Amino acid sequence: MDSANLKIQRAEKHYAELSALLRKHRPFRYFVETNFKTGEKATFAKKDEEVANHAAIIIGDLVHNLRSSLDHTYWDCTEQFAKSDGEKRNIQFPITSTERALKESVIPGLPSRVSESFALALEELQPYRDGGNRNLCLIHDLDVMDKHKLLIPTGNFTKITSAMIQKQVPDFPSGIVDCSFGNNYRDVGWRVQPMTWTQRRKAKIPVSNVLEKELDVPVETVLADVDFLRPALEILQEMMEATKEARQVLRDGVKPRV
């Protein structure tokens, strides 16, 4: 049984589940609010806590399965060469701070105990933070983080522009430059001509005199702890591909000892 591959397959199911969730529900949305009595208007972001938390649970499970796949692969390649039960319990895919740390603390014993090709395979993967394989390190770091807090995604509203909003809200203020829209209670506020009581009644404005309207603007779901500008799904896809590659490289590196 290839348990490492089963873990990858499980991560792929989580990825598909997350993709479906984000297609069906928008965890981060953007609105315009109008107070028809006072004439006050404002744009603001809104977060769906339930959807965001659901996404966080899926992301945590996905990352954990990737980390487990790396460990299962490393176990399969090295377990038979362990000299004691204690050594077996400590087998895990190594992540170090630097290339030097990898070569000094992990690589030295591998050629004689497993194979020279396996040691070279591990070096090829560059599982270290300083100039190494960022995706493999991310898998490890996010898995550790998920043990203490949810990997809650956030919304990237930076692609919104004034012109984009004016297409849907014509009275949105012009001349706003170098601005950013984000997870604020209010981003931009302005005033328009308020309605009279008669006008509000005729237009069937609710008793609160306030209406919210969702705007059709691009809001990416991102992992702010990783990269605020790239979609979370894109980053997770790269992490899955890195895991598959690591599994194959390590398996190819294990050759029968002559």
Image (spheres, rainbow, N blue to C red):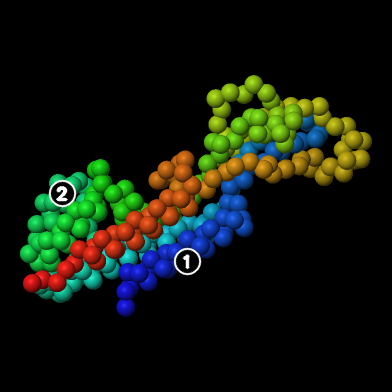
Residue 211 on image: x %, y %? 76, 42
Quick check: 159 left or right of 32? left
Q: Earlier in the sequence, mark 1 or mark 2?
A: 1
Which residue is more in the foreground, 58 or 125?
125
Task: Return the residue at label 2.
Answer: 101
User: Residue 198: where, in percent of width, then height?
Assistant: 92, 36
Residue 227 in the image: above or below residue 119: above
Residue 25 appears in the picture as rendered: yes
Q: Quadrant of residue 40?
A: top right
* Residue 173: x %, y % from top left: 69, 25
- Residue 61 visible in this rendered orientation of the protein: no
Please state which of residues 196 and 85 is positioned toward the viewer in this rendering. Answer: 85
Q: Which residue is mark 1?
A: 13
Q: Secondary structure at mark 2?
A: helix
How many marks are shown on the rendered structure? Answer: 2
Q: Position of residue 15 (x, y in %)?
A: 47, 61
Neighbours of disc 2 within 10 Å: few (<14), some (14-19), many (20+): few
> Which residue lies at the image location 47% right of the left edge and 64% below the top edge?
14
Task: Give the residue type that dot 1 points to.
Answer: Lys
Q: Is residue 128 left or right of residue 165?
A: left
Which one is in front, 149 or 121?
121
Q: Residue at x 56, y 36 (%)?
A: 159
Please, what secondary structure does the residue beneath circle 1 have?
Answer: helix
Quadrant housing the N terminus? bottom left
Q: CA separation, marks 1 and 2?
A: 35 Å
> Does residue 100 appear to the left or right of 51 in the view shown?
left
Mark 2: which amino acid? Answer: Ala
Tell me if residue 254 comes above or below residue 158 in the rendering: below
